[in-house]
Amino acid sequence: MESLEFDPATTALIVVDMQNDFCHAEGYYARIGRNIGPLAAPTAVIGRLMEDARGSGAAIAFTRLVYDDSAGSMEDRHKLKPKRWSAHGKRLVPGTWGAEVIDELSPRAGEIVVDKFGYSAFEGTTLERDLRARGVETILLTGVVTYACVLATAFSAFDKGFDVLMVSDAVGSWFAHLGDSTCEVVDLLMGQAAPYDRIKLRESQPA
C-alpha cells in the first residue's frame, strides 16, 4: 500500500501511558495477575517511531496517567462504576517508579511529558499548548490502552483541530477485538489507522 508521508516540522509522535505499572512485569497490573503482554507488545515499534521522530526533528510527547490525591483513583470518582472494572486502590502514583515511562522508551531532555488524571491527554494538561508552540498540526498516536486513553486522546485531538493518525501496530489492548474496533472508529470518525511500515517522516532539510 501507498506510504503516508508526514512533515516532521508539523508532526508530533504521542506516546500514551507506556508506564511501568501498565507495561512492566513488576508493575501494578502484573502484580494483580493481569497479562501485561499485550500492553508491552508495541514497545519495539514505538521505539522505532521514536528513532524516526528524533532523526527527522519531529516533536515527541509522552503522557502519564497518574493517581489524583485530591479526587482518588478513577473508580472512586463515580457512583456508577464500569461493570468489568478490575483495578482498585493506589497505582501510578506520581513520583514513583510505577508512574514512570518504561526504560525502553524513556523521554529525553526537551521532549514533552504531561501527567493526566483521566483518559484524555488533553483534559487538564498543557499538551495542546505545548504542541501548538512547536507548530504541530498532525499527531501520530501510539501507546496504551487503545480503546481507552489512546482513543480518548484521539477524539480530543480531532475536536481541537489536529489531524489524527493512529499507528495500528504501535498500540496495545487488553482485549484485541476492542483494539481492532478502535482502529475502525478512527478510520470512520477521526482520521486514519495505519501500521508503522506505511508511515514516513521526511528527513529534516538543512538550514
Image: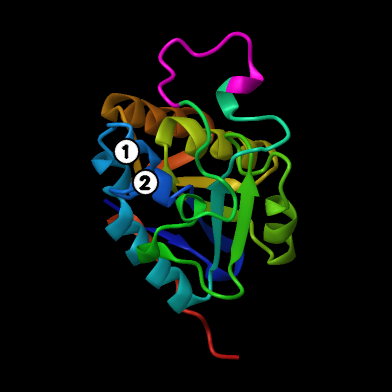
- Which residue is the site of mark 2? 27
Q: What amino acid is labelled 1 in the image?
A: Arg
Image location of residue 115, percent across then percent down: 63, 50
User: Dot 2 lies on which element?
Assistant: loop
> What type of secondary structure mainly makes up the magenta span?
loop
Tell me what residue is drawn at x 63 percent, y 44 percent.
116
Q: Quarter-wise, where is residue 44 in the image?
A: bottom left
Which residue lies at the image location 68% right of the left edge and 67% below the top edge?
A: 134
Mark 2 Cα shell of 10 Å, populated few (<14), some (14-19), many (≥20): some
**Residue 95 horizontal side relative to residue 101, left or right:** right
Q: Quadrant of the C terminus?
A: bottom right
- Can you identify the residue that label 1 sits on? 31
What residue range appears in magenta? 76-87
Which of the pair 204/90 is nearer the observer? 90
Scheme of colours in the image: rainbow
Which of the two residues, 127 or 17, is positioned nearer the viewer here?
17
Please, what is the three-letter code of the amino acid marked with disc 2? Answer: Gly
Tell me, yes or no, whether the highlighted magenta stretch contains residue 84: yes
Q: Position of residue 9 (x, y in %)?
A: 59, 70
Residue 132 in view in this figure: yes
Residue 49 shows in this picture: no
User: Within 10 angstroms of label 1, few (less than 14), some, or many (20 or more) residues?
Assistant: few
Q: Report if the CB atoms under discs 1 and 2 are less than 8 Å apart.
A: yes
Residue 97 horizontal/vertical position (percent) = 47, 56
State the residue at coordinates (63%, 10%): 79
